[in-house]
Image (cartoon, grey):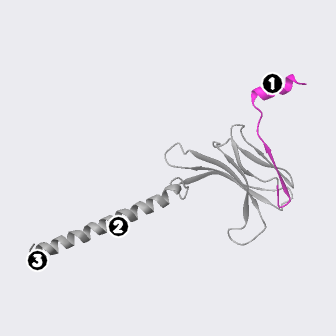
Amino acid sequence: MTRPARWVHLLLEIIGGLSIFAGLAWLALYALSYPFRHFSGANCDDAELKIITSPDGKHTIKSFHRACGAGSERPYQYYLVYLSTGNPNPGYEYTQVVEIRDVAIGQTTVAWDGPAQLSVTYPSSAIVGEAYAKTFGIRIVLHPPLLDDQVKASKSTY
């Protein structure tokens, strides 16, 4: 083998080795990122933002509907309720107290029943992802509406 042919051969081996290394590095990064493929990141939209102050003025809640995922159907839909903590530090002013999953816009409502009680109404088909019974002295009551069959059954038992 001539000297230029050996250099070409060596160069091709180096390029091949680098290509294999780059391919394995890409595969490793893909494998590490695969579990996060549906992570919301910046792919969410919030709607129906409401800020409601308690009757005594001590607390506020923020509630909103969040739709996440790719495409127009937005497969991941949530209704979130946050309660004020009284902490003035940025990022700690509110804490999440209720998360209702699989709800469309307008299906869930939240209201103050008094100075220390919140009521959240949602469809019976929804899934409660997270809910606290009492936070910062505020009682949180969940009210899924009764299905027609449940209403008929309850009327027949009395």
The three-letter code of the residue at mark 3 reads Arg
Q: Which residue is mark 2?
A: 21
> CA gap, disc 2 to disc 1?
67 Å
Q: Which residue is mark 1?
A: 152
Q: Nearer the viewer, residue 127 or 48?
A: 127
Q: Quadrant of residue 90?
A: bottom right
Q: Is residue 78 above or below residue 158?
A: below
Query: Which label lies toward us, 2 or 1?
Result: 2
Q: Nearer the viewer, residue 114 or 29?
A: 29
Residue at (69% x, 37% y) in the render: 125
Query: Which label lies toward us, 1 or 3?
Result: 3
Residues in magenta? 134-158
Query: Which label lies toward us, 2 or 3?
Result: 3
Q: Quadrant of the C terminus?
A: top right
- Among numbered discs 2 and 1, the one appearing first in the sequence: 2
- Among numbered discs 1 and 3, the one appearing first in the sequence: 3
Q: Which residue is mark 3?
A: 3
Q: Quadrant of residue 153?
A: top right
- Among numbered discs 2 and 3, the one appearing first in the sequence: 3
Residue at (67% x, 42% y) in the render: 106
Q: Secondary structure at mark 2?
A: helix
Q: Quadrant of residue 29?
A: bottom left
